[in-house]
């Protein structure tokens, strides 16, 4: 839901068995209802929300939420009291875990530390709010399997120290969709789950995850033409029919480094690869001088109308795109299979390409930029 709330994708996800929705707000829940989900299939996974939003979610019918503080527990109790209702919501306690190796860490904002575990459980008992289990998030785009190992072992420590059985564990999301890193993380997670079951008298009977990025990233590709070209002796500036305020908001907010290929206009048959001595600057179409999408060394000579194709643009792109400066959102083209998506043998970023915003951490045949969705 968070990574890409497109209604067609949501309806496709709904057709999968055992899939429920992790929601950040009542607004996302309503979109889920439109896609065919039931209210009891929502996990309100936002530990710090407005009381009004919590009450809205209660009236929608959500019955499980996350919390990571005594204040959060008291908010649940107060919300039901003000509505004149008896509590009918369960609480999942979110733990603070080591997410230092992720592209987007969360623990500065979310998660209960070990000194907060007992007070939270005491508050839940006091307000007669059922304890539904634990959750954690090792950070978005984490390629370090050890982060999951440490986090699952921390959940075991919670059970041992609090003497409270943990019926369910939500292992979070941020899974990279490439096969290698996913397989490594999956092997580590499965090993720790089996180890817990073998070594403890009680282990969680239910394990869930939040694979939004994993599902949505490969479902969408982006095509945008070059709108304008300005050349000088050692560099060329290209204006693309998109921006960091639109589909490339992922560069800013998700630290994305999207690979791309460039094709001659109209036919999409010939990729442009012949290098030159010039450096190419790919700017977005807005009036913001910081709207710089990528820089390419020894770039080929491109022309107005040539089309840049970006694969795997489904996660945290459309979800945060805006119409800043009055530019419309892209036209969407839906297809089944790979008919409109060019082959990308290597999804790793081109070493000649750099991205201006550094942190620590199909395709349409028209000249209009478009999004394509692959639904199978």
Image (cartoon, rainbow, N blue to C red):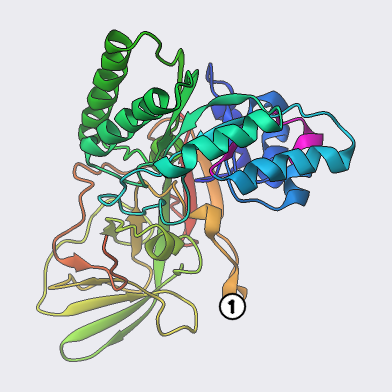
Q: Where, quadrant-wise, is the N terminus in this rendering?
A: top right
Q: Can residue 157 be seen in this view?
A: yes
Q: Give the range drawn in magenta.
A: 56-68
Name the residue that disc number 1 marks: 325
- In front of the other: 17 or 218: 17
Q: Tell me the quarter of the image containing the C terminus.
A: top left
141 in the magenta segment:
no
Question: Residue 349, percent across and down?
Answer: 21, 55
- Image location (x, y in percent) of residue 213: 42, 41
Residue 44 appears in the figure: no
Query: Toward which corner of the image does residue 250 lie, by quadrant?
Result: bottom left
Give the side of residue 310 with respect to residue 86, left or right.
Answer: left
Seen at 69% across and 24% down, the residue is 40
Residue 182 placed where, x, y %? 27, 32
Q: Is residue 293 above or below residue 40?
A: below
Specify whether 52 is left or right of 116. Answer: right
Residue drawn at point x = 44 percent, y = 69 percent: 244
Query: In the orientation shown, which residue stands out farthest toward the right?
Result: 84
- Residue positioned 38% across, 40% down in the render: 218
42 in relation to 221, above or below:
above
């Amino acid at each position: 839901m968070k990574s890409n709330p497109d209604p067609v994708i949501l309806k496709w996800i709904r057709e999968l068995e055992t899939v429920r929705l992790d929601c950040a707000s009542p607004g996302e829940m309503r979109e889920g209802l439109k896609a065919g989900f039931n209210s009891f299939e929502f996990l309100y996974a936002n530990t710090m929300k407005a009381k009004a939003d919590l009450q809205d979610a209660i009236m929608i019918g959500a019955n499980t939420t996350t919390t990571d503080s005594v204040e959060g527990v008291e908010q649940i109790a107060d919300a039901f009291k003000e509505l004149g209702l008896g509590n009918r919501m369960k609480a999942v306690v979110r733990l603070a875990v080591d997410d230092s190796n992720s592209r987007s860490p969360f623990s500065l904002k979310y998660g209960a530390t070990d000194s907060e575990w007992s007070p939270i459980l005491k508050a839940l008992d006091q307000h007669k709010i059922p304890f539904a289990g634990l959750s954690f998030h090792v950070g978005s785009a984490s390629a370090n399997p050890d982060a999951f190992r440490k986090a699952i072992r921390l959940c075991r420590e919670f059970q041992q120290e609090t003497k409270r059985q943990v019926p369910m564990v939500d292992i979070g999301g941020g899974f990279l969709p490439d096969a290698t890193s996913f397989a490594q993380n999956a092997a580590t997670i499965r090993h720790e789950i089996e180890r817990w079951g073998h070594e403890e008298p009680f282990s969680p009977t239910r394990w869930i995850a939040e694979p939004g990025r994993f599902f949505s990233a490969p479902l969408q590709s982006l095509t945008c033409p070059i709108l304008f070209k300005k050349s000088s002796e050692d560099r060329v500036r290209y204006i693309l029919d998109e921006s960091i305020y639109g589909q490339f908001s992922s560069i800013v907010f998700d630290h994305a480094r999207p690979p791309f290929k460039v094709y001659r206009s109209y036919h999409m048959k010939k990729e442009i690869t012949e290098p030159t001595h010039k450096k190419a600057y790919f700017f977005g179409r807005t009036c913001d001088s910081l709207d710089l999408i990528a820089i390419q060394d020894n770039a080929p000579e491109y022309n107005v109308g040539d089309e840049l194709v970006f694969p795997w643009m489904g996660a945290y792109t459309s979800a945060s795109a805006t119409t800043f400066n009055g530019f419309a959102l892209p036209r969407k083209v839906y297809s089944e299979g790979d008919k409109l998506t060019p082959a990308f043998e290597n999804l790793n970023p081109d070493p000649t390409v750099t991205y201006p915003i550094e942190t620590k951490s199909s395709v349409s045949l028209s000249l209009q930029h478009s999004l394509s969705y692959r639904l199978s």
